[in-house]
Image (cartoon, rainbow, N blue to C red):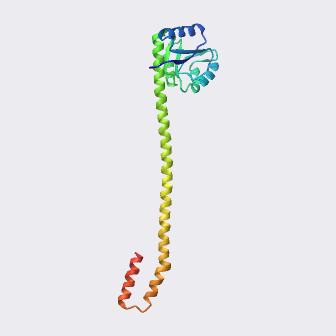
Amino acid sequence: MIENIRTLLIEDNPGDARLIQEMLSEANPGICQITVYDRLESARPALEQDGYDVVLLDLTLPDSTGLATLSRLGPTAATAAVIVLTGLNDEAAAVQALREGAQDYIVKDRMSPEVLWRSMRYAVERKRAELKLLARERKLESQTRDLEEVNAALRVLLKQREADKTELEERIVGNFRELVRPLLEKLKTSGLNDRQKAFVEIAENELNN
């Protein structure tokens, strides 16, 4: 259950602002804490500092109009659900607003306490689900980067191990050539009988292998 929804209303028309406050009070008394600003630029610092669950945004303000208002608000409303309020019944604008990050689009003359409250409640839930999904995606991306780093480190270690193995084999072969082969050559010329020479040849062949 959603409780104590922190709401930021950006509306320059005092009559509309008062009406929206009355609607929310009628729909759920005491549930919403409403802060009102009549300019976009004065509302943005408050949104950044205080944090809100919902932003009710009028698209026609003294310092911003149209969907540009939503775009300008966007970076400061990363964790808040944004509901666009407008006096125009423009379906294309509504679709574009949703594409640009708004959770809902309400035409003012069709607004009622029930419609507004339901829109806010659903918007908050959708935004929370969206943020959880984003957090999981970021966690997966971080884990993927960690795995890639581990795999890269393992590849380096395996490459080094192969190099060490090759170096060891070369040392063994080198030691054989420097130490064992001269001894075998001396044995061959040390007056061995045929049977002993055969043993030495067998030993040399096996060592070569």
In depth, the one of 4 and 60 nearer the eye is 4
Q: Which residue reaches farthest left?
A: 195
Look at 54% across and 10% down and name the residue there. Answer: 21
**Where's residue 60, x and y in %?**
59, 15
**Where's residue 81, x and y in %?**
51, 22
Q: Is residue 180 above or below residue 101?
A: below
Q: Quadrant of residue 65?
A: top right
**Where's residue 197, x and y in %?**
38, 87
Look at 46% across and 18% down and name the residue there. Answer: 121
Look at 53% across and 17% down and name the residue there. Answer: 84
Screen quadrant of the C terminus: bottom left
**How many numbered tags mark residues here?**
0
Look at 48% across and 53% down and name the residue there. Answer: 154
Screen quadrant of the N terminus: top left
Q: Quadrant of residue 44?
A: top right
Residue 112 visible from this viewpoint? no
Residue 166 visible from this viewpoint? yes
**Where's residue 145, x and y in %?**
50, 44
